[in-house]
Amino acid sequence: MAIVLPGGYRSIMEDFQNHSHGRSSVPIVVALLALAGQIQNQVDDGQWIMPAKNYASTRFSTLTQINAGNVNQLRLAWTFSTGLTRGHEAAPLVVGNTMYVVTPWPNILYALDLTNPGMTKWTYSPHPSASSQEVACCDVVNRGAAYYEGRIYYNTLDMHTVAVDAQTGKEVWMATLGDINHGESLTMAPLVVKGKVIVGNSGGEFGVRGWLAALDAGTGKLLWKAYSTGPDKDVLIGPNFKPFYKADQGPDLGTKTWQGEQWKIGGGSAWGWISYDPDLDLIYYGTSNPGPWDADQRPGDNKWISTLFARRPETGEAIWAYQMNPHDDHDYDGVNENVLLDLTIHGQLRKVLAHPDRNARMYVMDRATGEVLSAEPFAYQNTSEGVDLKTGRIKTVAAKGTGLKTVRDICPASPGGKDWQPSAFSPRTGLLYIPHNNLCMDFEGV
């Protein structure tokens, strides 16, 4: 089946495909995908206390002060400079009358007084190791913080998670989660679920072994760590693990789909966004590209890289998984956001997640089971011909496969039809707004 697109969207996409042929490096700022239905949205109280606004990752605010009638009257009110010129990828938090801003390395946390705009209440400096900048694959960025019960939680580039008192700026605890000397770093925004701070590592390009972990919000104690590769006991796969598709079923696929012990340096880090469904009690996240990039050096499906996982937040137990890009020879990852929606499909209300993948396909999936309901392109692409909804397998184009050779005109390029920049869903318009790319690449493996 496919989600039917309205005529306006289809004409936009056809015009885009007919005229660009995927060869322009100019990004298309916004594409629209219509989704009819309702969302599980938290009550909007004028605050923004977690990275994606709510657990459903809609990034939608119900505030109405700014509208089409007065937006042209907006004027600059005040500015604040972090004094840094590297990538700023963290959305601010707003809690009460305070705005919290996290910077890229050196990961300073600022508390700004919104009753006295531009004035700083306090500053917290975690002093991360300068050497951590050398293991940041893609700039020394930080993607944000989360507020929970009077504290601000965020990660530092040098593999620490910190809890800071939101009123005073005093450090409550700092937890060490890895070693930069192994190629690991921390760039993602944590999510706090049921008193647990959920965190994932970065470094798929440097031979790390990816993982997602949970820390006790009160103490910083490590509660569980779920690896993306390796035997089932390390991936936290047990008797309740029931993936929808046969290709994702079977014991110890995290080792059997790799050659020898390559899974120990296989990537699959979890540096993207996390969503949570309180009714199903499941967190959702994606894993990154495999290591090494050279596809010929790691035969097999390489599970569980480029995979969506559904896990229990209290134990980390995997409930289902779906590998979108087996073998992943284009660095497409699977870390993009999962927007939780309740959609009426063929007359039946379905609990789904919408995942705009870097392979340029919009996955609409049953979030209780992992079944793919639709996987249509939302941007120009020529690396796949579709997804078999019976097997869940993507139908890749062999001529665009990479390895120890030169392949030209691969669309999308490794940043994907959409990279980490998150989408937003509006229940008012029924539209999912996607900041996507129009990029292609030539690839040579050496």
Image (cartoon, rainbow, N blue to C red):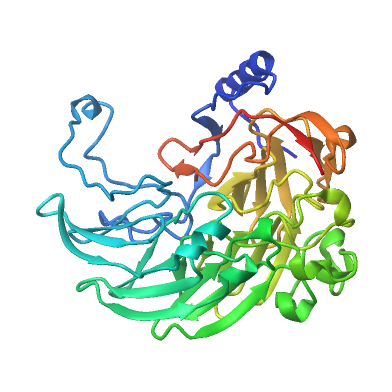
Instruction: Locate residue 403, reporting x and y percent.
Output: 85, 43
Question: In this view of the protein, can residue 390 be seen by the observer?
Answer: no
Q: Residue at x 71, y 61 (%)?
A: 267
Asked whether 84 or 313 is in front, the reply is: 84
Residue 240 against residue 295 in the figure, above or below: below
Asked whether 260 or 192 is in front, the reply is: 260
Question: In this view of the protein, can residue 144 be seen by the observer?
Answer: yes
Residue 197 against residue 17 in the figure, above or below: below
- Where does the N terminus fall, quadrant-wise? top right
Q: Is residue 224 left or right of residue 106?
A: right
- Where does the C terminus fall, quadrant-wise? top right
Kindly indicate the quadrant of the structure image that contains residue 129: bottom left
Instruction: Locate residue 433, reporting x and y percent.
Output: 49, 37
Q: Residue at x 20, y 61 (%)?
A: 96
Instruction: Locate residue 430, reporting x and y percent.
Output: 48, 38
Kindly indicate the quadrant of the structure image that contains residue 346: top right
Residue 397 against residue 111 in the figure, above or below: above
Q: Residue at x 89, y 37 (%)?
A: 398
Kindly indicate the quadrant of the structure image that contains residue 415: top right
Q: Is residue 54 left or right of residue 206?
A: left
Instruction: Locate residue 141, reporting x and y percent.
Output: 46, 53
Q: Is residue 68 left or right of residue 197?
A: left
Q: Give the number of marks.
A: 0
Q: Residue furthest top?
A: 19
Q: Residue at x 68, y 29 (%)?
A: 440
Asked whether 354 or 184 is in front, the reply is: 184
Q: Is residue 425 left or right of residue 329?
A: left
